[in-house]
Amino acid sequence: MFQTSRNLIKSSIHLSLSLSVYLLLLSELGLAESNPKNAPRLQQSETVSQNHQTPTAVQQLVNEAEKLTRQKTIPSQLEAIKKWSEARLEWQKLGDQSQEALTLLKLGEIYKNLGATAPALERYNEALSLYRELGNRLQEALTLSEIGNIYIANLEQGEAEEQFRFEHEFFIDSRLSQLRLTQQHRDDKIPLEFYQQSLKIYREINHLSGEASLLNAMASRYLHDDEEDKQELLEKSLAIYQQIGDQKGQALVLGHLSELYLIGYGNDQVGWDLFNQALALYQKNNESLDKEDLTWRQGEARLLSVGAYYWWSNNQQKTLEFYNQSLNIYQEIGDKQGEALTLTRIGDYYGSLENREKQLEFYTQALGIYQEIGDGVGEANILDRLGLMYFRLGEVEKALEFYNQELETLQNVSEFYAELGDEQQTLIFDYRQPVVLFNLANIYSQLKDEAQEREVYHQARKIYQKWQDDEGEASFLIKIAERYGKQENSEKMLEYFNHALMVYRETGNLEAEANLLVDKISFIYFAGLGDSEKGLNSLNEALKIYQKIGNLEETANTLNQLGYFYRELENKEKAVEFYSKAAVAFQEMNNFSDQAYTLRIVGELYYELGKKEQALEAFQQAGKVIQEKGDTEQAVKILIQIASDYKELGDGKIAIKFYNKAIPILQELGDYQQEAAILRTMGQLYYELENKNKAIETFNRARNVYQKKGDKSGEAWTIYEIGKTYTILGEFQRALDFYQQALAIYEVEADASFREERTLDMLIRMSRIYAYLGDSETALEYCKKSLTNAQNFPQSKIVRRSEMFREIGKLCYQIGEPEKALESFSQYGTIYQKLGPDREVVGLIRIGEDYAKLGESKQAIEFFNRARIVYQKSGFSEGEADTLISIARIYYYSGNYQQALEFFNQGLRVAQTINNRSKEASILTEIGDSYSQLKDEEKALEFYNRAKKIYQELGNYRKQTDILNKIGEVYQQFGNLEKALEIYQQALKISQENDTSSAYDSSFISINIARIYSELGEFDKALNFLQQALDYNQERSSFLYREMGKVYSKLGELEKALQFFNKSLNLQRDNYPEAQAENRLGLAVVEQQKGNLEEALSQIKIAIYLIEEVREKKNSPEERLAFFASKQDYYEFYIDLLMELHQQNPSQGYDAEALNISERSKARSLLELLAEANTDIRKGVDPQLVIQERSLQQQLDAVEQRRVEVYQSENDSVEEKTAIEQERQYLLDKYEEVQTKIRETSPSYAALTQPQPLTLEEIQQQILDDDTLLLQYALGEKRSFLWAVNKNNITSYELPPKALIEQAVREFYTRAVNRRSTSDKISKASESLSEMILAPVASQLKNKRLVIVSDGILHYLPFSALSVPINSSEKQDYFPLVFNHEIVNLPSASTLSILRQDAEKREPAPKSIAIFADPVFSSDDSRLQTPTSPQSETWEQYNLSRSARQLDIGVWERLPGTRTEAEAILALVPESETIYTFDFATNRAIATDPQLNQYKIIHFATHGLFNSVNPELSGIVLSMIDPQGNPINGFLRLHDIFNLDLSADLVVLSACKTGLGKQVRGEGLVGLTRGFMYAGTPRVLVSLWDVDDAATAEFMTRFYRIKFKENLSPTQALRRAQLEMQTDTEWKSPYYWAAFTLQGEWR
């Protein structure tokens, strides 16, 4: 609605101000702002009231009429018409033609002001005849101009009606539409004729004021499309006004010129200069005004509305400022019409901002004024706006109220014009009523009031019947049918189409009847009701009618339509039959073009039927049709089209044959340029057919064509195009050769077309090619040449030159020359800077966007910040908010949520300051997105709900559905499926009930609902919603087919599942590796279910390859919508499949392969964790290599995003797709080079980021010894697995499903962490779990060291406390595993190999131990001497709080026992060998001190977190308060730990907390221990839960005593300490000793 309103405003302030005050009819178009006093005025001696010889009776009539006219009310104007009409009769009786003519002018003016243009025109024409008889040239000129104004008014009104119907999407054929067509063809020439006649007279009598006024009027947009024509007329008018010193006229024309420059040309500098000149003239003359003459102030108000329109889209503050200034003027001078119009515009503007509250406020004010002054048309327009606004807000009762008021008002207006005798106006306002009735019917439909719905439709039909408008009535019925079509009510749709059909039949309109059958009814049957038979019958019925009335053209088209239907029905033989008949019909009517086109379709059908000979015959016949008629130009066009058909069909050989047929005809026509173009295309085809020699020959033929003609420019162009072809084909050296040849020609051909552009383009292409070839030096050389060339570009091509600087900037950056890139971008910025601040900021933003697309976040942010500063200086707050959002988004997509939130919040404050509610809600949504990515459910919901509340207030249903969808996703993400389903259903309801929501919205919501039902096991419902989604949005069919495949797979309908997975796969391109992988996984699952294990294996291998090729990166919105499976699900399935194959073929080594896949999955899991944590690892690698690697990662991410956009677009060419692939491959090659260097120079870093997992043989050779048994677990949904590996053998076992194991682990864990648990309870829980996970391998355990590689929840299982499996029916006492075994845990078997390699290179630390204990967590701590007031939460405090919430930790309590623990340990070691801290000193600074690499053992006696929800929030909690009470960062997070520089033998975390949520994969523990291992220790001793302080102190004292005094390994010391706790202390329960587990090296 509001874009339309803006168009209305634009039309209102265009150059039509010579029109008189057209108050009632076109008020909202701004014609009320017209200035009749700018037209030439009558002289005093000529006026009606000043003739002293006038008889008293007539004089009295004239005086009464004048008085009534001045009152400006509707009744007074109607009474004035009567008085003037009586006066006219008196003048006729007196024979006074002069006074009669003047009276007619008065009548014409009143009728015109009342909007009754027909009687106005009649009076003006009568006056014109009289003035010509009298020879009064001045009044003749004036009357001619008024007649021209009437015709312009009719054009204005016609446009207003079109806008009205456009706003309501109501376009039908009717008497009114025919009237409008007639006006457009007739009236667009007539005004100019009358103006020119008038102008001629003014010039002949030297009436300069009249001439200037006419020139101004003639600059109307209705008379001149060319802006320069308008400019010339206005400049002539201005010159005359300046000559005669008419400042009012000058101000008026200056205002029009300013609008032309600001709006038409976009020339801000000149436009605002003219604007200010006009404004100065208006303001200068305000004080000396005649109080009766309001035109000066009105002119100033109109000018200010131009300023408002200029700022409409870009600056809310300035737009409202200009409108309010204009409004104040109208209010000061009492111009109610201008006031109401301006209030309406302000309401429209608030509507465009989606601020419904303010919109309603201003509409209501405007409505009151229109009602006060009796302006029925203005009142109806506002009522219409209010009705539409409330309808879109969903407040249908309110909408009903306003639409009914509008209907009543329109009826009154129509009656009013009927009384005035203006049939055209009566028709117009009668015909607005069906539009309103149509809206009312829509409301009654929503209210389920079918009776009222039918009644209003009936009322509308009566209006058309009143005017005997059969076409209008039938078209209205068709419109009703189409509405039912949108509601997918095919039965109702057909009913109303049949009503329309009856109207046509009753009136004998056979052609319209047939058209309806063909265009509408046949499609309803065919597509809507699925009744193809009735659809075909309708077409055949129409065919008979067309044949009966002899309409050969429609006969042919209907035959074509029948052919199309049969083609859709896959009945190609029948389709051929009807297309062939259509071709004959086209031949009969000599429509050879359509005949040839139809024969081409016949050819395609034959080709698809495999009848290639008939296909060739049909295609050849298509060519002959035109040739035989002697139309060689059309003939060659058909031949080229046929060749293109074959090219599209993939038959390049036949395509070449037809291209060859075209060439001699082109030679005959002398069209050598088209000939050369075809030869280039043939060359490409030969290349695709791998006939390189023929390709080269054909390319040279194309070149020779130009050479023979001496067309050097064309030759260069051809060579240039050949070079581009070779570039696309990847033949880079050939491309370079041809580019060089083209450059040589362009160098000497100074006048060649597009010489500068193509030269520069080739230099850019050559630079990129040299980069692709690995010749970086030459690439840089051409990059510099490109920059120099652009700098020397002709000034006349400044826009093209400026854009080239952007291309060069991108090129230089991509080839590794960021300095040159910045130089080029800066030159682009300089060009825009010279154009003024408004253009400067555009340039800066574009550069920022370019850098963002290149993946260069730092420079992108720099340029956005510069744009922000420009906006701040200019006071354009909206622009500032937009740049803040752009910066925030860059941080968001790079995973830096701290900075993203900072800038989003800055943008939010700006949006709130300027009261831009829509932007405020948009930013709140993006803040919610950020918290959602952080997995902070509480915060995400808070901000989403705030945004939702604003969108509800604004009535923006589209955004409400989007927000509800996001809220549903949050609930779904955190496992609250019922709540998620409730929210999604709310969103779908809103989406379906409101036209503003798109099919995409409804589709996506339906998909979400389907996924919920699938998770809940309600598969039929899931399929129903997926089908709904498919109906809403066919573009997402590939994704939806895949989802359907998953549901059918779960249902066990395997053939259907295969069908849908394959359909999805066939629709995908290579640019969606994750989507392909998902389909391959789906196919593998189905094939496994069918027992086709080898086929399943083939599919999962492809899937794994695809997901391992995808680098880890932050999810884009598109990826967030894709619902890809966790990568671990792929590995889980792969392992399950291999183990099933192993069961069938035990000797084929599938179990070893499965073990290897388990290792790969763990490596991949760690990579995913590092990516999710946005871990910036700087340790152990050359910083420059890391910078290069990350820069390339960012560039690849950016290229991938552009690649998706290119492939999604239907408009992008093969060249664009090839270019993006070449750029991607170039970056991948560079990325691989950098990774190779990293592997060579930084093996530890490479082992972490580019893992190469060990095979079974390598594990046995490098990891295991004779005393060690590896137990590696893999948990699966259907079943789990255990591999037992010793030095020589591997044995595998099938275990229960993951859910059963998890349940048993939780039960045992609950017992173990409860200090009050009895031995019996622990033993029982332990036995149950041991039976599941240890009993199968019991015979191999013996007394060996057990190396355990866990999976999922098993990472948090204290294996040492599990009871030893006993093969006896007799009840045994609790006998934990630690009694007979050393137990060590590993993140993966491959990890140990890396640890041993690192240990060999590491220098041993000289000192013994560093201990950090008893930190200060809270400002409430008694150690803080000075109380402090609460302070705002820092980012790290927020992260720590978030992690605590997820682990269900209330407050961070002091750990006083850790001081005792530390002191006991310190007593065992010489003081010189230690370092320790307590209280405030146990802070992050000391924990990250490089001096820590001097200590063999690092002991953290403080809270540690293993976060399974957000593994990146795992870490160690140190002092969070300094001695002065200030908050400090005390959270040593995962990424901090990876960057520590240690040289330790052991790291101990003695007070860790674990959260076993619904989904536990173990990444929290693995990530933290792996981080310390990378930092420089081969082993980490951790506690799995909080243990009693005294017990922990006792345990640690024993552990260190054994280690130091008896010099045992940490593994041995740990076992001894655990045994002693059970035998020698009061703390015998596993709660006190089983929490401590060792990860890493046991030697």
Image (cartoon, rainbow, N blue to C red):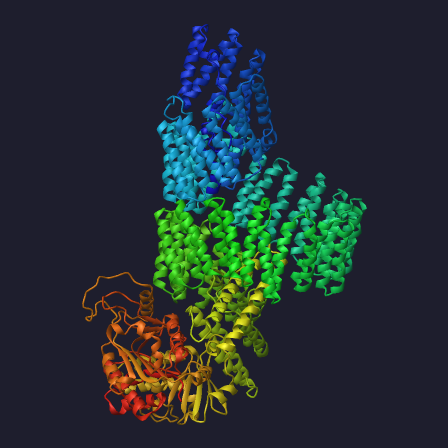
Q: Position of residue 766 (x, y in %)?
A: 63, 60
> Quick check: can you spot residue 1048?
yes
Residue nearest the viewer, comparing 1227 with 106: 1227
Which of the 4 image quarters holds residue 771? bottom right
Q: Position of residue 1051 (x, y in %)?
A: 51, 70
Q: Position of residue 1595 (x, y in %)?
A: 27, 86
Q: Residue at x 57, y 12 (%)?
A: 135
> Quick check: can you spot residue 413?
no
Looking at the rendered image, the quarter that the C terminus falls into is bottom left
Residue nearest the viewer, comparing 433 with 1563: 1563
Q: Is residue 275 above or below residue 1012?
A: above
Residue nearest the viewer, comparing 4 with 1234: 1234
Task: Say whether residue 1627 is left or right of residue 1350.
Answer: left
Q: Is residue 981 above or below residue 1386?
A: above
Q: Position of residue 625 (x, y in %)?
A: 78, 48
Task: Say whether residue 759 is left or right of residue 257.
Answer: right
Q: How many marks do you count on the picture?
A: 0
Which of the 4 image quarters holds residue 890? bottom left
